[in-house]
Image (spheres, rainbow, N blue to C red):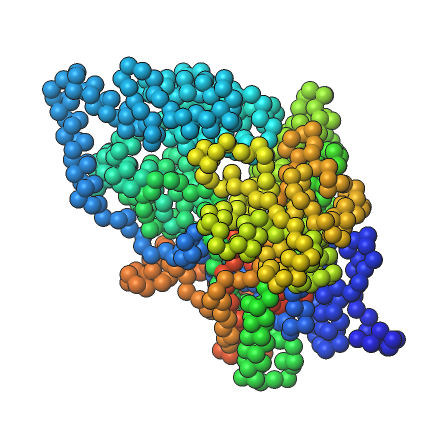
Amino acid sequence: MNMDDPTAPPAKRRRLSTQESTATDVDIILESKTTTNGSSSAISNINDEQQLEKELRVGINAYVNPNASGFTGVLKQRYTDFLVNEILPDGRVLHLESLTPPKKKQSEEEVETKQEDEEADSVTNGAAGETKEQDEHKKAADLPQGVQQDSSEPSQIPNEHTTTLQTIFGEKTTKGVINLYNAVLKNPNKKPRDYKSVISDVISDKEVRTQAHQAIRKIFSSKLDTKTDEENNTITISAAPKVVKERGGGQGGGRNGTPRVKNKSGWDDLGGEYLHFTLYKENKDTMEAVYFLASQMKMNVKSFQFGGTKDRRGVTTQRVSVYRVHAEQLARLNGRLRGSKIGDFKHQKEGLELGDLGGNEFVITLRDCHFPGEDGLAVHERLELAKKIVNDAVESFKAGGFINYYGLQRFGSFAASTDRIGMKLLQGNLKGAVDDILAYNAAVLPSEDNQTNDAPVIHGQNISSDDIDRAIAINIWQTTQNANNALYKLPRKFSAESNIIRHLGQKNNKSINDYQGALQTIPRNLRLMYVHAYQSLVWNTVAGERWSRWGNKVVEGDLVLDTDYAAKMNPTANSSASETKKDAAQEVDEAGEPIISASSSAATTGGHDNTIKDHDTIYATAQTLTADEASSGIFDITDIVLPLPGYDVTYPPNELGAFYKSFMASEQGGGLDPHDMRRSWKDMSLSGGYRKVVVRPGEGMSAEVRAYGRDDEQMVETDLEKLNKRTGYRRGPQQKLAQEAQDVEMREANTATANGATFGDPHSKIAVILNMKLGPSQYATMALREMMKVGGVKTYKPDFGGGR
């Protein structure tokens, strides 16, 4: 664009900070689209403008390669257009291979027969001495590895375990915990409530509390349970509930091929106490699927563990583990499951933890794609143009990667964004945070002029009945202060809103202004997500600022993780650094998203042998690059990290360090100070973390361009479809999954809206199918944004959406 030409169309500019604005990558692309495509620009409608405004508001404003041609396409028109397969820690992509449990090995049958014979002999002979000997053997088998059992003395905990406990809890609490454990072993038939619980001293550091929970579980083999008192920051250690004994019929008891296993040695013969299995699900939340499994097994949902949550609108495959359940028991549930399946069962010694994954493989189908310069071209010419543009976009993406922005879903999809709520929490404006949580769009409320049953429409989108009821309920509360009437109308899924109204509406008048008390009734993970969203806003904004200043150039003052620094500067250093790096990259925050955590002196346990090996205790520190190191060519832009604001991180000692301070001090940043992130309310104290600025996709990325006609045409087979094809299985009339019902609705809609002879033409539309692997902390939507550019991703909107 010629800046001196007054007739040139102006680029759309948005000022994102208090700093002097310069033309952003978004400006350049908008200008290009305006001048080349005219009125047919992909961003010419209101939905694209809204999407762009949302991205700019949360700091998403730059591209690695803004000059590459983009294209448009509809994302998730069918949920089978979005396939997600977990990448295992060893790098293999997980697929559903079998629905049947493994056949029993000969050793398992011998274990079962031996145990049944011993039980029969005990009953028949009535030999007290022999029964006592068996009991002692079982008690010893139940002890953690390294713990010695003496018939006349309490259990001896290994010194390294004792040291770990004393480092976390102190000597007094450690002694009480060990005494409680011995009491549980000595009196296995007592009910858990009959034992006296042990309450720790105050543990204010969240990371240390996490260590405490993990240590108790691992050292005492889950025989002790822990619970945090969120108000006092103490931990209560108590006897764990007993695992429900298996009974006959369909739930084990030795029948129907289920091995009878009653002690740890028996589980070890199977491979371990944790049953790992593959969960395949269609158009379901991970927790929705896991809750159903737990309800059918009559178990606490906390018995199930997984590496990370997966998208609802999609077809996803992931590993899950469950404690002391037989594969045969779980496999029987496949007949009751709708929209999900379980398989590939294997017993292992350890359960899964959040972060136990190497990332995700995405197979994404983008429908109804359009490309610059396609107007007037025949279908075969459009296909050739599409292949060139897509191939160029993919090659550029593979070479340069994308800025590792937090995606829009991190910030919520409603007017009162999660980052704004988090900002007010950090400001200490608790009333403001409560007001934002209870905010709604007044246009959602039924009006006197609208007496029909038609759902309100906002920005061209119908509003769901749940969101209408939410707005009505909050309006009742705000105008009448009648909590009972408001809660009666409020749908149960809005837990934060219902907890706040319930607390503020207590008959005790003192509660009406108890905003901290109201906020503390919200589940802790949700409270923390608010402040983490604010951190993400700051990180996105700083990442864009860094890119606008230096692009992919490594500069003096850039930060590199210590593990990466050591590996680059001394490649022959001991290999443990690479293992630490791997673990650090997999740590997960409360939103279910892995991040790299900051260091914490409080996490030290006193020695290598005393370290609890799990993802919650891996901490990272960063090294500042000198001018010589930055210009050496040793480091790449993908090595550079930026901190999430906190009290335990290093800020770049260059212009970006000053930018952190000026942005957070601005109105948009909330008037906060990056060097003052401790709060009297411990949950609001942020230690910080690090995140890579630019990331590249894993090896093997591919793209396919295909012509199609019917909107319900499926482009890619799911794991279940491939499995059914291999096994010759066909779905019965009662086993149709939800996608088929959606296809019927889509065909009916298309029949009603089809225009002219183009509908139904097998070559009238173009789809792009992308296959890419991303790390566990990386957003597929941000990867698509880099390839497709401004306004490229057209997220499919069902009939109803959020209207807050």
- Image point (11%, 19%), residue name: 125
Residue 191 shown left or right of residue 799 in the figure: left
Residue placed farthest to the left in the image?
Answer: 125
Whole-percent x, y for residue 402 in the image: 61, 62
Q: Nearer the viewer, residue 460 or 557?
A: 557
Q: Position of residue 546 (x, y in %)?
A: 71, 57
Compared to residue 225, the image places residue 737 above or below, namely below
Please name the residue shown 76% across and 50% down the image.
659
Q: Find residue 778 and report its image quarter.
A: bottom right
392 vs 474: above or below: below
Most foreground residue, 5 or 714:
5
Q: Quadrant of the N terminus?
A: bottom right
Residue 714, how many percent across, how many down? 46, 67
Q: In terms of image quadrants, where is residue 388?
A: bottom right
Residue sitting at x 26%, y 33%: 265
Query: Residue 365 location, x and y as percent?
Result: 51, 66
Q: Is 519 displayed left or right of 345 in the figure?
A: right
Q: Is residue 247 visible?
A: no
Q: Is residue 158 left or right of residue 60?
A: left
Tell me if residue 107 comes above or below residue 722 in the rendering. above
Residue pictured at 17% horizontal, 16% vertical: 128
